[in-house]
């Protein structure tokens, strides 16, 4: 009889320990799931963080012009409005247009749309996108000072990377290849002639500042 009572008491203690362990296990799983859900929510919030940014190309300012890029970033995408003016150096004109007879000043208005994917840092990511711009190319003949405005409409592919510097400031090296989908135009002065390019490319670097909204 005593043995039977002892067995019943041991069984009850085992059952009680099982219940305690079961409650502990459930509590542990709930903590894990809630932590995982919180982490996923934080990651989602980080990836969906909205930004406004402004960028500038120092090359344009060095060459008697300006560069302003206003942008918005969210949903893994970047949208950029571009306004640029550059008075190109003679070395550029000779390298890209194979001419020593003309000077070139260009005015660009454009839109850039980039895919950035999930962000691990709000000012750090690679991107790939399209670049659409309209250019007014002002050519001036060096000897006669005659000038002419030629126009292009470019559609291109670009890639780049944002590198953080300090508290929202960053640099963005990028490169693009453009196809002029408008008809080619030419400017002739005597024996000297110059034409818009069917294909063009650019490599540059932007300095930027982003603000969370």
Image (cartoon, rainbow, N blue to C red):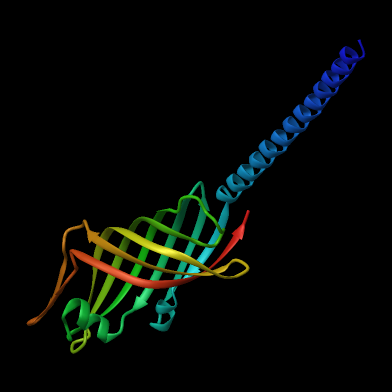
Q: Residue at x 31, y 61 (%)?
A: 134
The residue nearer to you, when weighing 99 against 47, is: 47
Q: Position of residue 129 (x, y in %)?
A: 37, 55
Q: Is residue 189 left or right of residue 133?
A: left
The residue nearer to you, when weighing 136 against 26, is: 26
Q: Position of residue 188 (x, y in %)?
A: 12, 76
Q: Residue at x 51, y 46 (%)?
A: 75
The residue nearer to you, when weighing 78 against 15, is: 15
In the image, is residue 30 above or below residue 70?
A: above
Q: Position of residue 28 (x, y in %)?
A: 73, 36
**Residue 144 falls in which quadrant of the image?**
bottom left
Q: Is residue 87 left or right of residue 21?
A: left
How many numbered discs, if any? 0
Q: Work out which quarter of the rendered image holds the N terminus and state it.
A: top right
Does residue 196 appear in this view? yes
In the image, is residue 162 above or below residue 115?
A: below
Q: Is residue 159 left or right of residue 190?
A: right
Q: Residue at x 18, y 86 (%)?
A: 100
Q: Position of residue 192 (x, y in %)?
A: 11, 81
Q: Residue lying farthest left? A: 191
The residue nearer to you, when weighing 145 against 116, is: 116
In the image, is residue 73 above or below residue 11?
A: below
Q: Residue lying farthest bottom? A: 143
Does residue 146 appear in this view? no
Q: Residue lying farthest right? A: 2
Q: Is residue 179 left or right of residue 8?
A: left
**Residue 85 falls in which quadrant of the image?**
bottom left
Q: Residue at x 30, y 84 (%)?
A: 89
């Amino acid at each position: 009889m005593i043995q039977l009572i002892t067995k019943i008491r041991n069984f009850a203690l085992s059952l009680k320990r099982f219940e305690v362990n079961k409650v502990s296990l459930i509590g542990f799983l709930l903590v894990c799931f809630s932590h995982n859900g919180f982490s996923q929510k934080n990651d989602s919030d980080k990836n969906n963080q909205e930004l406004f940014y402004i960028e500038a190309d120092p090359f344009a300012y060095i060459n008697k012009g300006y560069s302003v890029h206003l942008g918005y970033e969210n949903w893994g995408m970047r949208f950029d409005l571009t306004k640029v003016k550059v008075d190109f150096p003679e070395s550029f004109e000779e390298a890209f247009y194979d001419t020593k007879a003309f000077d070139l000043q260009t005015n660009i208005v454009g839109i850039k749309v980039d895919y950035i994917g999930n962000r691990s840092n709000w000012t750090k990511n690679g991107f790939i996108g399209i670049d659409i711009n309209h250019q007014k190319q002002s050519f001036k003949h060096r000897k006669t000072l005659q000038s002419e405005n030629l126009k292009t409409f470019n559609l291109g592919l670009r890639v780049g990377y944002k590198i953080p510097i300090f508290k929202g400031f960053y640099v963005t090296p990028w490169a693009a290849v453009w196809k002029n989908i408008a008809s080619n135009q030419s400017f002739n002065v005597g024996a000297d002639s110059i034409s818009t390019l069917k294909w063009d490319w650019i490599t540059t670097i932007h300095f930027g500042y982003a603000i969370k909204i």
